[in-house]
Amino acid sequence: MKTIIQNAVDSAGRLGASYADIRIIDSQKQDIMLRNGQISAMDIADNIGFGVRVIVNGAWGFASSAKVEKEEIERVTALAVEVAKASSLLKKDDVKLAPEPVYQDIWVSPYTIDPFKVSISEKLDLLAAIDAELRSKPEIAVSVASMSFVKRHQWMATSEGSLIEQTFMRSGAGFSATAVKDGDVQKRSFPSSFGGQYMSAGYELILGLRLLDAAPQIRDEAIALLSADVCPSGQKDLILDSSQMALQIHESVGHPTELDRVLGMEANFACTSFATTEKYHNFTYGSPIVNLYCDNTLAGGLATIGYDDDAVRSQRWPIVKEGQFVGYQFNRELAHILNADRSVGANRAQGWSHIPIVRNCNLSLMPGDATFEDLIASVDDGIYMAANRSWSIDQKRLNFQFSCEIAWEIKGGKLTRMLKKPNYQGMTPDFWRSCDRIANADHWTLWGVPNCGKGQPMQGAEMSHGSSPALFRSITVGVGN
């Protein structure tokens, strides 16, 4: 394989490319889903292919193929060169790549139990047991339980001399119960909504989630929501659980700080950003206790990898430090916009058939010094919300509204009645500036996002966001209930 990929970049150079790279990716996936006790999805697939990226006359060219053979790689490399030559006729400026050391390395994400060696029957038995527990009460009309596994083996070579082999393993699982009565529909999910929890790990993650043990509580909460009061409207202090915080981070900090979005280079799928470059090192993004860091070396993260698709070694860097806006997510091509010495390693593609673009990384809110009980005790009149149900945010990532599956009212520093249909809204900087307390590391969880969409053609990507529960003062809640 090393000889094949080295031949590709050498061939690109002979054809006039000033830079070239090739990625060959061999991937496996396995998705299993039960719905009301019946198999509703069983997607088992292997996939292999390669993509060649070149710079000719200062412009990018890219081409790919599923036929990994020497002659085909030479043909596709020549095609990528022709694409670049055509693109150069319309270029505005030459592509400039920030320098990066040359690496020759092998990187493997750690795991204990290979999920692809665990039998389908064992996985189905666990999902069926969860389903049976959820539907043991008649109010549950729909139960869904699922598992998902991905293994990717990638070889990458660049014309600069880097030669990198990487293997990435990802596992995920979760379930939901939907209760129905008198026209009301309420849903509860575990460990989080939209498929549960995903991490860079093996089948040990599934065992550690203790899904079956959690099923009775989640089932009973879905049923209890049917008779719960609706979340009141008004200005209230708001505590968000860590899984909802993960989505809040993703939508109102992650996407706004992707530099290609800021520059208007990628606005097709999810628009642009309010966090424009004049605010860089000159803008209060949050309160002084808000510290948000990207870290693609973080154990368990879905964006944790040895090197990105620019062959840049993974690293950790701040986005918001003590409330101040100090960082972006960017690649080698955009580093010069910020006068940066090198890329932060945020360039990734959806497999071999797509060209790499700037993507959200593992972006997390650093924990504070409070216990969860401290957060509750410091609220006289507020709401505690958990588990996302829906989200909406405008084209600049400013004005947002989120709804959650479940909430509890807080009165006099104590959790009181359960509430249904909770939601909240705000403006991104105002919201983060209202952050008053953050729970400590004992309450911190890294949540995986396996399905982030961006670009046109749309690409999917995976990343993680960590957070403890956090308290925000005087937030608009309950609007539209």
Image (cartoon, grey):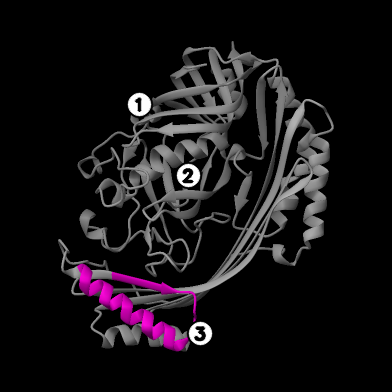
Q: CA distance from mark 2 to mark 1?
A: 19 Å
Q: Which mark is residue 249?
A: none
Residue 235 found in image quarter = top left
Could you say where residue 264 lies in the image, as x and y percent from the top left?
A: 25, 48
The answer to whether the residue labelled 1 contacts the one labelled 3, judged by CB atoms less than 8 Å apart, is no
Question: What amino acid is at disc 3?
Answer: Met
What x and y, as percent, mark residue 247? 50, 38
Q: Quick one: label 2, few (<14), some, or many (20+) residues within 10 Å?
A: many
Secondary structure of the residue carrying numbered label 1: helix
Pick whichever of labels 2 and 1 is earlier in the sequence.
Answer: 2
Q: In the image, which residues are magenta?
A: 61-87
Please state which of the two labelled residues, at mark 3 or mark 2, is closer to the viewer: 3
Q: Which residue is mark 3?
A: 1
Left or right, 386 with respect to 247, comes to right
Q: Residue at x 53, y 25 (%)?
A: 239
Residue type beneath disc 2 = Ser
37 or 361, which is in the foreground? 37
SS category of the residue bearing label 2: strand
Is residue 75 one of those drawn in magenta?
Answer: yes
Disc 3, SS: loop
**Which residue is depicted at the point 22% across and 68% down?**
87
**Image point (33%, 34%), residue name:** 285
Q: Nearer the viewer, residue 170 or 432?
A: 170
User: How far separated are the C-alphas under marks 3 and 2?
Assistant: 36 Å
Q: Is residue 81 left or right of residue 35?
A: left
Q: Nearer the viewer, mark 1 or mark 3?
A: 3
Q: Which mark is residue 430?
A: 1
Q: Is residue 443 left or right of residue 80?
A: right
Q: Which numbered circle lies on residue 364?
A: 2
